[in-house]
Amino acid sequence: MLLSAFISKRFRAYSGHHQETNGFVSFIAKASTIGILLGVAVLIVALSVINGFEQQLVHRLLSVVPQVEYVAPSRPIANWSAKVERLQQQPNVMGAAPFIAVNGMAQFKDQLKAVEVRGVEPSLEGNVSAINQFTSAKLVSQLGIDEVVLGKQIVTQLDAALGDTITLLIPKISEKGHSLLAPQRISLTLAGIIEMGGPLDSSAAFIHLNKAQQALGYDDTQVTGLRLRVDDVFSAHNIALRVGQSIEDYVYISSWFRTQGSLYQDIQMVRTIVYIVVFLIIAVASFNIVSSLVMEVREKQGNIAILKTMGAQDSTILATFVMQGLTQAFVGVLLGSIIGVVLAINISELFNWLSQLFGENPLAGVYFIEFLPSKLVWQDIVITVIVTFVLAVLATIYPAWQATRVDPAKVLGN
């Protein structure tokens, strides 16, 4: 192996000093190295962005949106406090809280905005939601009975400010449920603003549970639904079905898979597509090594013949040209990994800079976040490096084997 490494190094040094005789071979070798470099860098950056989106989905979106909900389709759920206590005792349940959800309108002066009004119990909402992390001024857990917390985009559209009086128009259904009555008008003080950087900013309006009960004519024990936070968000649907059996009320069972499941599936699909496409790019670049090595074997037939007459074994010749190909792959993988890691670490700042430069954010209003997240996972880099080297080894086997078949008598005779 040491002899093969020495000969491989001498071959590379010879090629470097005689570019005029084998310039095309050198060009193909460099092209394959650059192709591997770009493929590795792109794969690392792409996977880091996908991991970032998945991380933000779990820690940002799924920490705020309901993971599991039990919603009453007709009559409200009574005696919610006892049922919340019962749900909190179930396995895999980290927290439970009541809520009243209804679509309504927010009005300030002559401006109107459609909102999803959500009546919550401030003392329990923190058990099921991390909304307090994204709320400025007064938190949802500190919400007073005559106060409201609105999303940032709602506040911007209404041209309101903290301390202003916001009017909520909440529809009320007749007792028989066949017609809508005149909407309830509730005047509340804007006490907090949600700044999550996603769709919640344009739709959420949080009010005190007692205020929502008064608006809909419920008593203090009635709510429209119960919400859970579970210990494993990816098992939320199965947990919801099992835990829901402890509720005697007729309810609809809903998990985040129904509301946000398509987004998670899209992330996984994009991950698969990126793996396939970029590994194909790396495979093409790796098999360019075949072309460069085949031409190099043909060009160095005389050297190979001389080595054989001096007693070099076939395994030595084979290892020499395998190392030639692996050296090209190593340079591409090393530089690609460095470039990919640097870009992955700084991709968020680079994206923000480009957005400011062009004055447009392509993620605004499209995804649940308005920035480009990145999470570097070292296992992805290891897998990328291993697969690339495996492809490089496969690419070098045929031309290296061809080098062992050189007949010294024929070559030196000519």
Image (cartoon, rainbow, N blue to C red):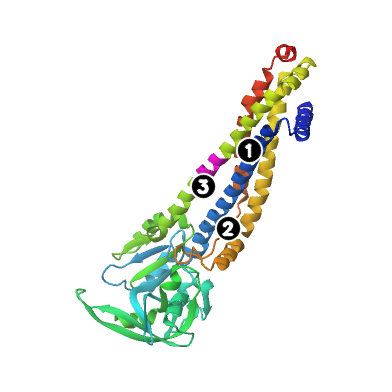
Of labels 1 and 2, earlier in sequence is 1
**Residue 52 image-quadrant placement:** bottom right
Residue at point 33%, 77% (across, down): 104
**Residue bearing mark 2:** 374
Q: Earlier in the sequence, mark 3 or mark 1?
A: 1
Task: Specify the label residue 274 is tagged with.
Answer: 3
Question: Which residue occupies the foreground of this view, 407 or 216?
Answer: 407
Say which element carries label 1. helix
Q: Secondary structure at mark 3?
A: helix
Any part of residue 221 in sight: no
Part of the protein shown in magenta: 276-281
> Which residue lies at the image location 61% right of the left edge and 48% below the top edge?
41
Q: CA distance from mark 3 to mark 2?
A: 15 Å
Mark 1, residue position = 32
Most prominent secondary structure in the magenta stretch?
helix
| Nearer the observer, 251 or 172 | 172
Q: Is residue 54 above or below residue 390?
A: below
What kind of residue is marked 3? Answer: Val
Indicate the quadrant where residue 309 lies. top right
| Residue 211 picture location, percent across and down | 37, 82
